[in-house]
Image (cartoon, rainbow, N blue to C red):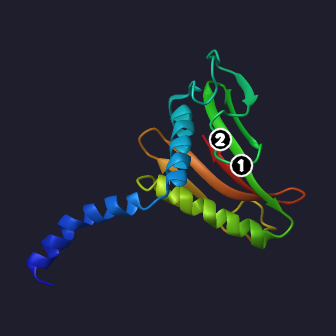
């Protein structure tokens, strides 16, 4: 590859990334907007009006369902403890890990698109009895906000999304 081709490649690379981001659907874009609003709450440790209207700010806010939701289920909560805002949502439950792993992968792909500038890490799942994928951590190093995607098991398997 000569120098002209290399320079052309370097110049067009950012354009390609922008075009790749444009390929997400409107519903995915709206989902990313909701995700970013919840991340904003965790980052600044304030539950915004878009998440819960007319909520007085304090060091403790009991768990409640957010008005902007990421999941189709009712298993989402946002809360504030010790001055820190966190979110937890249970996306999918099933008796078999295969179906849960499928939904885990789909949610991971959505997170990857929305958080493409964030650092990503994988850690072993905390439950040694599970043969499920590793947990995913997306971290914003500027303010250390973290998005964690994992699979847990109680009576069934659950895909869990946490933001803190």
Q: Position of residue 22 (x, y in %)?
A: 39, 58
- Quarter containing the N terminus: bottom left
In the rendered image of this protein, does residue 86 appear above or below residue 131? above
Name the residue nearer the viewer: 140 or 67.
Answer: 67
Residue 157 visible: yes
**Residue 50 is drawn in which quadrant?**
top right
Residue at the spot 50% in from the left edge and 59% down from the top edge = 112
Residue at the spot 63% in from the left edge and 22% down from the top edge = 53
Residue at the spot 64% in from the left edge and 26% down from the top edge = 52
Q: Position of residue 67 (x, y in %)?
A: 66, 33
Disc 2 and disc 1 in contact, CB within 8 angstroms = yes
Residue ID for mark 1? 72
- Crowding near pointer 1: few (<14 within 10 Å), some, many (20+)? few
In the rendered image of this protein, does residue 19 appear above or below residue 46? below
**Residue 3 is drawn in which quadrant?**
bottom left
On residue 128, the disc is none
Q: Position of residue 89 (x, y in %)?
A: 71, 46
- Crowding near pointer 2: few (<14 within 10 Å), some, many (20+)? some
On residue 69, the disc is 2
On the rendered structure, is 8 left or right of 124?
Answer: left
Q: Position of residue 34 (x, y in %)?
A: 56, 41
């Amino acid at each position: 590859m000569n120098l002209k081709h290399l320079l052309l490649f370097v110049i067009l690379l950012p354009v390609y990334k922008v075009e790749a981001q444009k390929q997400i659907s409107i519903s995915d874009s709206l989902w990313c907007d909701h995700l970013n609003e919840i991340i904003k709450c965790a980052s600044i440790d304030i539950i915004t009006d878009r998440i819960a209207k007319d909520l007085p700010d304090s060091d403790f806010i009991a768990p409640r369902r957010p008005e902007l939701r990421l999941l189709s289920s009712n298993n989402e909560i946002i809360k504030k403890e010790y001055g820190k805002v966190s979110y937890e949502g249970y996306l999918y439950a099933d008796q078999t890990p295969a179906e849960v792993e499928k939904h885990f992968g789909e949610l991971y792909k959505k997170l990857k698109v929305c958080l493409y500038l964030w650092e990503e890490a994988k850690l072993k799942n905390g439950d040694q009895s599970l043969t499920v994928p590793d947990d995913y951590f997306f971290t914003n190093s500027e303010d250390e906000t973290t998005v964690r995607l994992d699979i847990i098991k109680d009576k069934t398997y659950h895909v869990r999304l946490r933001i803190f």
